[in-house]
Image (cartoon, grey):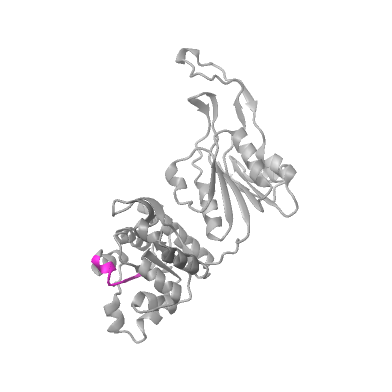
Amino acid sequence: MNDNLIPKMNDRRILIGIGGGIAAYKVCEVISILAKAGAEVRAILTDSAQEFITPLTIATLSRHPAYTDQSFWQPTHDRPLHIELGEWAEVFAIAPLTANTLAKLTYGLADNLLTNTVLASACPVLLAPAMNTEMWQQQSVQRNWQQVQADGRYHTVGPAAGLLACDRIGKGRMAEPSEILAQLRSLLHTGGKRDLAGKQILINAGGTREHFDPVRFIGNPSTGKMGVALAQAAFHRGAAVTLVHAPMEAHLLAPLSGVRLVSVTSAAEMHQTMLNYFTDADWTILAAAVADVKPTDYSSMKLPKRSLPTTLPLSPVPDIAADLGDRKRPHQRLIGFAAQTGDIVPPALEKLQRKQLDAIAANPG
C-alpha cells in the first residue's frame, strides 16, 4: 500500500491481540499500516501466537515493545498490566481469533494476558476469526460465535472462504488486512455504536455503461469507491444494506461481506432495480454515476470497424433520482450527489429541490 494513501490516525490508541494461527502473519501488515498512519499501537501475543511470529517482529512494526504472558506474570509496571492496557485502548482487535480464545470470550474466562485485558476493558472489540473449515463448522464453535456476537461490545469481520493453509477449500480464512483496517477506522469513529440498527439502507454506486454493440459502450470513469465506502460505513453501524452497483473491480467489493450486492450494467437496469428495492428502504443514497443518455441504436452483433458510425444518435435514459423522489413516502430519506464544475452550489441546490431530495452532496467534478 502506498504510504501517501494511508488515512491519518494520529494518536489513536489501538490494541491488537494476536492468537495462535498461521494467519498471524497478516496482522503484521495491519500493525505496520496503523503505525505508519500515526496510530499508537500496542500488541499482545498469546503463547501459541509466538510459535508463528515473534514479539521482536511485532515490536519493530509497532514501534513499541510487544506484550506476552511473561510480561503479565512478571509485572514491572506500577499498575497491573491488563488494567493499564484495558483502560488505555480506544479499540481492541483480536486477530486471528482462535477457537480456543473464542470459547474463553464466550464464557468470560481469563487465564492469560489477552483474555484478562478483554475483561479489564470497556472499548469495542473487533474479532477476526481464522481456523480450519472443519473446526469453524463445529456446532460448539458456531454456538460460541453466535453467543459472543450477542454481546454489544463485540464486532466481527470475516471469516472468508477460500484456500486455507491446510490445503482445504472452505470457510475459515481470516479477513484481509484492508477489511480489518476499514472496520477499525469505523469503530474509532463510532465508538462501537450501532446507531443504524434496524434501518434498511439502499445505495447505488459505479458508472453505468450504455452499449451500442456487445463490446462497445459509452460510459464514465467512476470507480464506485464512494458508494462502497458508504455501504461499508452503514453496515458497520448496524444497518441492513443493499448496494446496487454498476460494473466495478472485484477487489473493491470484496470487503462488503454482509452487504447485499446487486450487479447491473445499464442505467435502465439500475433504474428498475432501484425501484424494486426502494419500497423497503428507510434511507436511499444515490452515489452512482448514472448515464444521462444512451445510444439510440443497438447492434446485437459487433460492428466491424468500417461500419462504426461517425455520429452517434442518443436518447435519454430514465431519471432515477426524480422517479424515486416522486415515490418517496414521509418516513423515507433520499440523498443525492452532484458532481459539478465551476460554481458547484447553485446547480446542486436546484437539483435538490427539483428531484425532491432530502439532502445533496455537491462535489467538484
Q: Quadrant of residue 245?
A: top right
| x 29%, y 51%: residue | 167
Residue 207 position in % (x across, y down): 54, 37
**Magenta region: which residues?**
42-51
Q: Considering the image in quadrants, where does the C terminus appear?
A: top right
Give the vertical position of 42 relative to 301 (above or below).
Answer: below
Q: Quadrant of residue 113?
A: bottom left
| x 69%, y 43%: residue | 324
Query: Is residue 7 visible in this depiction of the protein?
Result: no
Q: Is 43 inside the magenta-drawn segment?
A: yes
Give the vertical position of 279 relative to 218 (above or below).
Answer: below
Q: Is 14 inside the magenta-drawn segment?
A: no
Viewed as shown, does residue 336 lie left or right of 161?
A: right
Give the vertical position of 220 relative to 84 (above or below).
Answer: above
Viewed as shown, does residue 354 lie left or right of 245?
A: right
| x 55%, y 61%: residue | 237
Nearer the observer, 127 or 362: 127
